[in-house]
Image (cartoon, rainbow, N blue to C red):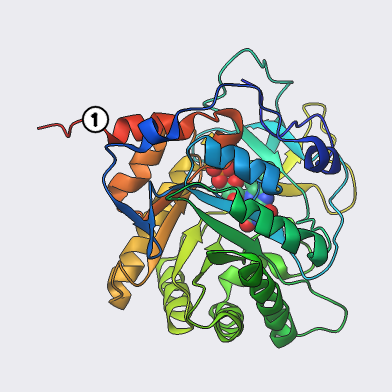
Amino acid sequence: MKSTYNINLSYDDNYAAGPDFEGQLPDLSALNSGLAPAHFVGYPVNSTLGVPAGPLLNSAYIKLYARLGFDVLTYKTVRTGYFPSHPFPNVRPVETAPGWYHHPGDKPSLYTLPALDESQPQLNLSITNSFGMPSRDPAVWREDVAEAKAGLNTGQILVVSVVGTVRHGANLEDLAHDFAQASAWAAEAGADIVEANLSCPNVSSGEGSLYQSPAAVSAVARAMWAALGAKTPFLLKVGFLEDQALVQQIVEAAARNGASGLAAINTIPAKVYQAEGQAALPGEGRLVSGICGAGIKEAGLSMTARLLAARNQVGLAKESFSIVGVGGVMTGTDALDYLKLGADGVQSGTGAMWNPYLAVELKQLLKLPLPV
Ligand SMILES: Cc1cc2nc3c(=O)[nH]c(=O)nc-3n(C[C@H](O)[C@H](O)[C@H](O)COP(=O)(O)O)c2cc1C
């Protein structure tokens, strides 16, 4: 199967010409009929299955995945100003071994794989991705978000992912206000939910590690809450953490400052080399990039379990604070694993790119009679 994002082209080419998909589209009313009622952050939806920030570059991608039966569609992270993408290549297949991310000391080293065989399914695929969170000018994305919203079907919602930009001389409060400005524009343009990306590991300038600091989580959430009020709920997207005490502090900081939930995980950073030993992605600061796909499923599930436990420890109700599971969902069965664990929603990035019928798979599984 080939990806709907063509990894042999630049980000800008994919933005202009994508998505790359010529398959059949499912009959949505047949696909959704018989599903149990579902809610995502208070909104009624056909299912809580979504695509996280990333693979859906613009309204053309959002409309395709809505037509493929995904119900929570996230618009790739945008900013308060134009920001260029890292140069091509941005995505490379990598080899991972079980538990590769448990690495003492420095970041683990991974190696790229040869080109993929497009005639085969890619259900065990892991990739590295490194875009640097590019953004179109706000005037462009605000209009396009409205277009994306207009392309949704009944029982589907739009999430817009935003990030603050670290500008010269800015402090944490300035950054938090930049998140808030992007959030306000996203809501105005039609986002049902705004999501703050606190966790991209590809940014060397500081935005990448916000999720590891309860003070930073509080500052960004507080500013977003002030900008959005009660009208538009917001989520915070965080990365992989193994320290339960810190996970609990992050949940508390988010909930106390108005967030409606947390989505996790983002990609896990690694040093990525070509088989010959050179860096896989050319250019300064790009030896370390973010790993996603099958090789992070175990990490995503374990983080979801930690977030659910933290929500209990803090005494928050499921209805008031959602936990959205992300990481390594390549098939309908993988998505079900997150839902069985208790996640309030599940999202597939890499899986949705190479397996666009994943929503069809999950919905068929959801309609099977429960085993007795
Ligand atoms: C092509 C691609 C682009 C991504 N871009 C973003 C982004 O702009 N913002 C963000 O928060 N996460 C981004 N991500 C991370 C995903 O949202 C997700 O957290 C991660 O890929 C793990 O999910 P997966 O294993 O299902 O891919 C991107 C992922 C991919 C595959």
**What residue does disc 1 label?**
368
> What residue do we see at 42% from left, 50% from top?
155
The answer to whether residue 257 of the structure is visible from this angle is yes
* Residue 5 percent coordinates (x, y): 71, 34
Horizontal relation, residue 8 to residue 62: left or right: right
Front residue (pair 244, 148): 148
> What residue do we see at 34% from left, 62% from top?
308
Horizontal relation, residue 233 to residue 149: left or right: left
* Residue 271 percent coordinates (x, y): 72, 45
Specify the farthest residue to the left.
Answer: 372
Residue type highlighted by circle 1 = Leu
Q: Is residue 175 above or below residue 125?
A: below
- Is disc 1's CB within 8 Å of ligand 1? no
The answer to whether residue 293 of the structure is visible from this angle is no
Marks counted in the figure total: 1
Specify the farthest residue to the top.
Answer: 119
Query: For the N terminus, which image quadrant?
Result: top right
* Residue 171 percent coordinates (x, y): 76, 85
Query: For the C terminus, which image quadrant?
Result: top left
Q: How many residues crowd around disc 1 within 10 Å: few (fewer than 14), some, or many (20 or more)?
A: few
> Helix or strand or loop: what does disc 1 sit on?
loop
Q: Quadrant of residue 165?
A: bottom right
Q: Quadrant of residue 189?
A: bottom right
* Residue 213 percent coordinates (x, y): 58, 76
Horizontal relation, residue 259 to residue 199: left or right: left
Q: Is residue 115 above or below residue 41?
A: above
> What residue do we see at 59% from left, 33% from top?
96
Q: Is residue 112 above or below residue 133?
A: above
Front residue (pair 264, 296): 264
> What residue do we see at 65% from left, 22% from top?
22
Q: Quadrant of residue 80?
A: bottom right
